[in-house]
Image: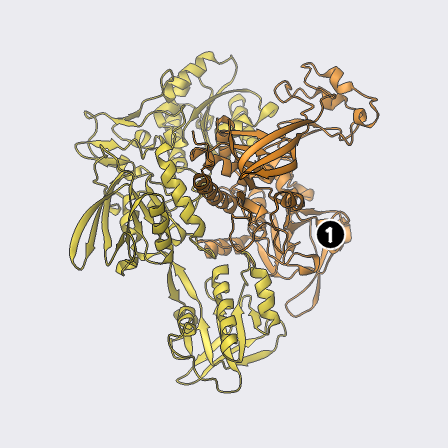
């Protein structure tokens, strides 16, 4: 069976492309380097208070359902691209699939391997919690073949440490790069205290903790009260090569702030910002609502340090240029969207140019890459929200479909 | 959430089409986006009639420009819409498979918001753009420099598109005169491709930006005088500007001529003045009613290049609308019992998808119906039912079957929305304990009072009804109506002497298994207490 489209990246944009293309009658194969589909969205929490805040994270479950039951879509997990060759307008991809050392169908999730594994971190659940993985870097078997405890204790025989990598050939008429983004590494901006000052976390970490139901707002003496969100960490900062706005962070900080307040009305969130970027048709109304619940301060703190009682302390400039010191129970860094470093290698393989911000958006034409037959979808093109990634993926799918129809490459069935 | 009153909706009187024709598309256009859409659809083999904006002429060059016609009224369903068009030459009708609203936003200059009056010196951004295109001349500067002040989002809000227009205007002015630009704003909106870079370039080239928080400038406008007085938000000193020109930004308002389409979709009571609900469930250009699509400002989306991606989304939507599949587990379309229907029109009023019509009795269009079941559960005469797929019972049948197979112990029947709660329960894994008997329904809107009461009658110790969060229901108000019905059923339980807390309604999302576990725990605690 011929593959019409090879989709590199199984995040929300890649999945949505596959879904739209299947509805248009085209076959796609999704190549995902991680062990799960859904990319970053699989780790985001629902931001609804008593009402939906329109973060879009729940869109993933809908599309995953369709993808997994479609006969026009298949996928390779834990798979990287080794080589790409082009001939006669078709793409030959050589893939390398790392084995599932714990077979997902055989594993009954009893957790015996987790309980007996002697090496911390060698066995872990995926962030979505639905699968177990072996981390080769921490596993003693891969260090010196000294341990096979998990194989021995597994009642289902689901663990296969000896499984080896597999090379796969994939032939396709077109390629969609849907490689997404990398969250900015907050450690690159040491003055905000990440990894150094206790009580400083990233927005993504807060999101993940909320998703996994292990964020505790505390009670009594230990109740969480003051939370500071600091915007533009790794965005709008040409000194570190990020001369762009990440677009989504004002929205996610405001949503998270309101979500925390809905969990505990005693929480008083503050948001330190340059310009608030969230905008949609109800922006004015939303900002008015948010303003009642979130204290908005136009300043990016100069420093975050360990203050009294072990709480993080922010130093920032007030409206009359006075230096202000304020402690918080929790500081949340709104880290921005960085280009996926893996895109550089793929771009080289596929001979597509990167733009000055190292994303794939070129010539202002947002789904073409400049190379015939190679398209881009989602945050690989530039920072995007979940809903924007979906809209973009729809546009990409439509363009891919007309390319396939035009070039007579489509194997419509 | 607003549910329409009977008199507030325009009743769809279009018949359910016997033959559907998907080739003809009516486009409400009138600007470049409409023209681009028309061209693209024609290239895909559709026959397109494009109407102008607010009664103005559509560009009638090329295929299908319907000069000077406006849409007066529209009835019908996908594959068979009947449109009444009118023009100065009289009225006509047309039959269309699809309708696409692709009208641009109205731009309303904010003169009044700032207490300013339009004059030679005080002009809107659109007026400046016209001047720069050569339609008229700029006022003469009083000195060597031309001082141009721009207001952008000082009142109301602005978006990156507005700032892009301001930046474009500044660059064009710079190519014509020695200009000193000022931009007075609250938030510089750079959340679009390349905008942060341009903002820096514009600033480095000498444009002064003043960003205000709570306060703002005071405008003094005389016959020939114009000054702006404010405290510099950074330096804290009093400043006075006497610009040669003051450019006022614009509110983006929804297109004016969407009303006939809004009238055709009952749930527009919750989405107006736009055609698309403000909900993640409506991605792309879909509206709640099959066959009606909306792009750009018509769907409430204002972006830098509003309609470029929407055009392609329309193509996909039109090409796939014939293959749109109803999940196999969902029931068939509503069947109306002629002996029971009194044509009270509750179903017509409450169908979020505008799938109901009526002639001798209420009737449903199967192609527009998504099987949410709201019509059946809200029908006061119990005249409507949705036939379950073969081999499956209706909701009560499923509850009966599930309870008969359930183990002994505390038994909780969970009526779960297929889009949210069913996923949430599936993802609970080992965390979920207790005897939860799931019954999946297409939408919580399907759950009616009798199903809930029947579950207790059949031996349930507790009933949990779980739908989507308000604002995230694919049938707009399905979850809200379900919540209302559950509270009604609670009252009835109480009257019957059953602890009403044994019936619980929650809203959750597909990715919140924890919330599902907590709800079950709370209900179990109530039952065992």
Q: Residue at x 58, y 61 (%)?
A: B196
Give the chain of mark 1: A
Quick check: A326 left or right of B331? right
Give the residue at mark 1.
A188
User: Hue of chain B?
Assistant: yellow
Quick check: B146 left or right of B310? right
**Residue B402, x across and y down, in percent:** 44, 16
Q: Is the residue B171 above or below the residue A270 in the image?
A: below
Spot the residue most to the bottom. B143
Q: Quadrant of the C terminus of chain B?
A: top right
Q: Residue at x 38, y 55 (%)?
A: B33
**Residue A319, x across and y down, in percent:** 63, 68
Using the image as rendered, state which of residue A303 and residue B85 is in the foreground.
B85
Using the image as rendered, state which of residue A268 and residue B391 is in the foreground.
B391
**Residue B10, x across and y down, in percent:** 24, 45
Residue B522 position by quadrant: top right
Number of numbered discs: 1
Q: Is the residue A10 above or below the residue A356 in the image?
A: above
Q: Residue at x 37, y 52 (%)?
A: B298
Spot the residue most to the left. B90
Residue A287 visible in the snapshot: yes
Residue B159 visible in the snapshot: no
Q: Secondary structure at mark 1?
A: helix
**Residue B296, x across and y down, in percent:** 41, 52
Using the image as rendered, state which of residue A288 and residue B370 is in the foreground.
B370
- In the rendered image, what is the letter of the chain coloured orange? A
Spot the residue most to the front. A88
Using the image as rendered, state which of residue B141 and residue A292 is in the foreground.
B141
Q: Quadrant of the N terminus of chain B?
A: top left
């Amino acid at each position: 069976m011929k593959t019409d489209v090879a989709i590199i990246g199984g995040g929300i944009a890649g999945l949505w492309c596959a879904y739209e293309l299947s509805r248009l009658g085209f076959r796609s194969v999704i190549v995902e380097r991680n062990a799960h589909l859904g990319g970053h969205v699989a780790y985001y929490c629902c931001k609804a208070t008593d009402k939906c805040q329109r973060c879009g994270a729940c869109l993933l479950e809908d599309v995953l359902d369709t993808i997994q039951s479609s006969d026009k879509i298949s996928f390779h997990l834990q798979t990287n691209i080794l080589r790409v060759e082009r001939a006669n307008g078709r793409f030959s991809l050589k893939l390398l699939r790392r084995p599932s050392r714990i077979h997902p169908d055989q594993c009954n999730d009893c957790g015996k391997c987790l309980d007996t594994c002697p090496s911390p971190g060698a066995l872990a659940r995926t962030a979505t919690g639905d699968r177990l993985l072996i981390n080769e870097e921490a596993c003693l078997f891969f260090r010196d073949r000294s341990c096979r405890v998990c194989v021995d204790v597994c009642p289902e025989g689901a663990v296969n440490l000896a499984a080896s990598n597999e090379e796969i050939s994939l032939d396709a008429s077109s390629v969609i790069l849907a490689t997404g983004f990398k969250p900015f590494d907050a450690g690159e901006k040491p003055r905000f205290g990440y990894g150094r000052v206790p009580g400083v976390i990233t927005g993504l970490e807060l999101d993940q903790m909320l998703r996994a139901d292990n964020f505790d707002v505390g009670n009594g003496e230990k109740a969480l009260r003051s939370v500071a969100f600091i915007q533009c960490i790794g965005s709008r900062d040409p000194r570190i090569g990020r001369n762009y706005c990440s677009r989504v962070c004002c929205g996610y900080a405001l949503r998270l702030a309101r979500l925390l307040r809905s969990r505990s009305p005693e929480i008083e969130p503050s948001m330190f910002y340059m310009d608030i970027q969230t905008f949609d048709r109800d922006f004015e109304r939303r900002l008015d609502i948010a303003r009642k619940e979130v204290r908005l301060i136009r300043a990016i703190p100069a420093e975050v340090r360990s203050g009294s009682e072990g709480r993080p302390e922010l130093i920032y400039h007030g409206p009359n240029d006075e230096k202000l010191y304020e402690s918080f129970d929790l500081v949340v860094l709104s880290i921005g969207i960085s280009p996926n470093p893996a895109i550089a290698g793929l771009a080289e393989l596929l001979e597509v140019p990167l733009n000055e911000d190292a994303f794939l958006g070129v010539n202002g034409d947002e789904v073409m890459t400049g190379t015939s037959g190679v398209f881009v979808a989602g945050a690989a093109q530039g920072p995007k929200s979940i809903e924007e990634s979906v809209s973009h993926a729809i546009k990409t799918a439509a363009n891919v479909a007309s390319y396939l129809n035009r070039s007579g490459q489509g194997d419509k069935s | 959430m607003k549910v329409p009153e009977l008199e507030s909706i325009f009743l769809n009187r279009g018949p359910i089409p016997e033959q559907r024709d998907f080739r003809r598309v009516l486009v409400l256009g009138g600007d470049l986006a409409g023209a681009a859409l028309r061209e693209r659809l024609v290239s895909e083999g559709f026959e397109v009639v494009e109407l102008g904006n607010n009664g103005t002429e559509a560009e009638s060059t090329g295929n299908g420009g319907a000069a000077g016609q406006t849409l007066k009224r529209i009835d019908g369903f996908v594959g068979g819409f009947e449109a009444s068009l009118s023009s100065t030459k009289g009225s006509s009708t047309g039959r269309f498979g699809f309708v696409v609203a692709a009208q641009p936003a109205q731009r309303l200059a904010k003169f009044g918001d700032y207490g300013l009056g339009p004059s030679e010196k005080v002009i809107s951004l659109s007026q400046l753009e016209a001047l720069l295109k050569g339609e008229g001349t700029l006022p003469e500067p009083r000195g060597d420099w031309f001082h141009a002040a721009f207001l952008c989002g000082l009142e109301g809000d602005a978006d990156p598109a507005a700032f892009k227009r301001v930046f474009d205007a500044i660059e064009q002015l710079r190519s014509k005169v020695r200009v000193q630009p000022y931009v007075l704003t609250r938030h510089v909106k750079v959340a679009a491709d390349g905008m942060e870079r341009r903002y820096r370039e514009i600033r480095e080239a000498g444009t002064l930006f003043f960003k205000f928080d709570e306060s703002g400038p005071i405008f003094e406008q005389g016959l020939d005088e114009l000054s702006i007085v404010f405290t510099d938000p950074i330096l804290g000193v009093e400043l006075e500007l006497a610009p040669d020109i003051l450019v006022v930004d614009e509110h983006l308002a929804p297109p004016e001529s969407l009303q006939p389409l809004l009238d055709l979709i009952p749930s527009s009571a919750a989405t107006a003045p736009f055609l698309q609900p403000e909900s993640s469930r409506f991605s792309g250009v879909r509206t709640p009613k099959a066959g009606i699509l909306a792009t750009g400002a018509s769907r409430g989306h204002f972006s830098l290049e509003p309609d470029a991606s929407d055009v392609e989304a329309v193509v996909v939507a039109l090409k796939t609308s014939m293959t749109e599949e109803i999940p196999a587990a969902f029931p068939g379309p509503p069947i109306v019992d002629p002996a029971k229907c009194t044509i009270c029109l509750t179903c017509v009023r409450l169908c979020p998808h505008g799938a109901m019509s009526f002639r001798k009795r209420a009737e449903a269009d199967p192609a527009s119906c998504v099987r949410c079941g709201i019509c059946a559960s809200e029908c006061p005469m119990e005249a409507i039912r949705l036939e379950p797929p073969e081999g499956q019972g209706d909701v009560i049948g499923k509850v009966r079957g599930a309870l008969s197979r359930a183990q002994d112990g505390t038994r909780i029947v969970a009526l779960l929305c297929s889009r949210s709660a069913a996923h949430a329960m599936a993802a609970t894994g080992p965390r979920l304990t207790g005897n939860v008997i799931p019954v999946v329904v297409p939408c919580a809107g399907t759950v009616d009072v009798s199903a809930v009461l029947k579950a207790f009658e059949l031996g349930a110790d507790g009933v949990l009804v779980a739908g989507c969060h308000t604002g995230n229901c694919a049938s707009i108000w399905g979850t809200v109506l379900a919540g209302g019905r559950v509270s009604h059923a609670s009252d009835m339980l109480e009257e019957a002497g059953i602890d009403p807390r044994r019936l619980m309604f929650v809203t959750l999302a597909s990715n919140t298994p924890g919330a599902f576990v907590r709800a079950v725990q709370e209900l179990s605690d109530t039952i065992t207490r």
